């Protein structure tokens, strides 16, 4: 009796979600395609790297059992590498994109001294970023604990800039170095502690929530991951993006409060 009634209620609930999911899946597919096109058109390797990291987290945490997630991530990773390898081998991928990727993310993630290096059209963007990283490291060395002051990177830049790089560009193009320069080790640790708490809370939500709420938490985790990785080569708290991130943080707190009220 009770089990039969419970199964009937689950079937009815499943039918209800099916009616909602079919049109919603079409909308989601369109959004994914448009977002993918925009991502490629951005020509930003930092955005590409963040998107790959966010997607990897989506795949890894999609199953509720962690071993299933690891297995799924390995399968998807091997399949993606195989498809890309075949595309490159048979020259089926756009040459410009292949060159952009194979020019190496390692060019963007090194700490070489760029003084004395000849500037060319090919290396200009990389050298410009590294020059600003050197300036940020100089500020961090001279002001270890408290930095030069929050928002003062541009004001302090003339005292630390390299000869060929007079424009401060507003930030160091690596948010972690930017933090060390502006707020020192103490501020940097506070920032890391905040985001550690955000990630930890999100992972707890993934363990406790059921679908569809779990899907929202999973998407938020992918956002936090992409943001964290992209910040290695840029600063994304610009153009009111922080307002959007604030809404997403608020959404996570709503999920947390809802879960707490049900437990």
Image (cartoon, grey):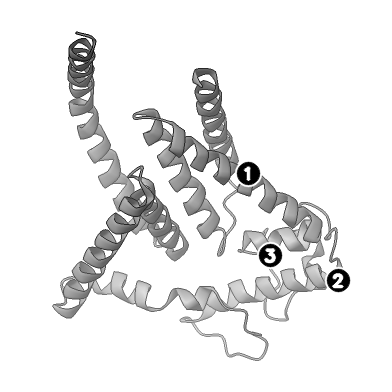
Residue 36 position, x and y percent, is: 31, 51
Question: Which residue is under mark 3?
Answer: 177
Give the quarter of the image for residue 76.
bottom left
Residue 230 position, x and y percent, is: 51, 58
What residue is drawn where x is 27% and y is 36%?
Answer: 28
What residue is drawn where x is 17% and y is 79%?
Answer: 89
Residue 98 position, x and y percent, is: 29, 73
Question: Looking at the rendering, in which quadrant would you find the N terminus?
Answer: top left
Sequence-wise first label, 2 or 3 = 2
Q: Which mark is residue 142?
A: 2
Secondary structure category for the residue under label 3: helix
**Residue 52 shown left or right of residue 24 in the figure:** right
Question: Which residue is under mark 1?
Answer: 197
Q: Is residue 137 above or below residue 231?
A: below
Give the quarter of the image for residue 231.
bottom right
Secondary structure category for the residue under label 2: helix
The residue closer to the viewer here, 241 or 26, is 26
What residue is drawn where x is 54% and y is 74%?
Answer: 109
Sequence-wise first label, 1 or 2 = 2
Viewer-nearest of discs 1 and 2: 1
**Residue 119 shown left or right of residue 51 in the figure:** right
Q: Is residue 210 visible?
A: yes
What residue is drawn where x is 55% and y is 64%?
Answer: 233
**Alpha carbons under labels 1 and 2: distance apart:** 30 Å
**Residue 115 shown left or right of residue 238 in the figure:** right
């Amino acid at each position: 009796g009770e089990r039969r009634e419970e199964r009937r209620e689950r079937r009815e609930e499943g039918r209800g979600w099916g009616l909602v999911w079919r049109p919603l899946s079409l909308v989601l597919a369109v959004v994914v395609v448009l977002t993918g096109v925009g991502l490629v058109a951005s020509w930003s390797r930092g955005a590409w790297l963040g998107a790959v990291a966010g997607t990897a987290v989506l795949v890894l945490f999609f199953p509720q059992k962690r071993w299933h997630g690891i297995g799924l991530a390995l399968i998807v990773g091997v399949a993606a590498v195989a498809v890309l390898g075949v595309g490159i081998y048979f020259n089926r991928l756009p040459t410009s994109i292949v060159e952009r990727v194979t020019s190496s993310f390692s060019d963007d993630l090194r700490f070489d001294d760029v003084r004395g290096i000849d500037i060319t059209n090919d290396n200009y963007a990389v050298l410009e970023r590294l020059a600003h990283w050197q300036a940020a490291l100089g500020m961090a060395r001279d002001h270890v604990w408290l930095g030069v002051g929050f928002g003062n990177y541009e004001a302090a830049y003339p005292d630390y800039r390299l000869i060929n790089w007079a424009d401060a560009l507003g930030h160091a193009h690596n948010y972690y170095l930017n933090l060390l320069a502006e707020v020192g080790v103490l501020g940097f640790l506070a920032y890391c502690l905040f985001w550690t708490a955000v990630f930890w809370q999100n992972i707890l939500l993934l363990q406790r929530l059921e679908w569809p709420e779990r899907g929202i938490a999973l998407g938020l985790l992918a956002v936090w991951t992409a943001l964290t990785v992209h910040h290695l080569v840029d600063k994304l708290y610009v153009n009111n993006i922080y307002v959007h991130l604030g809404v997403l943080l608020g959404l996570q707190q709503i999920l947390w409060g809802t879960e707490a009220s049900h437990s």
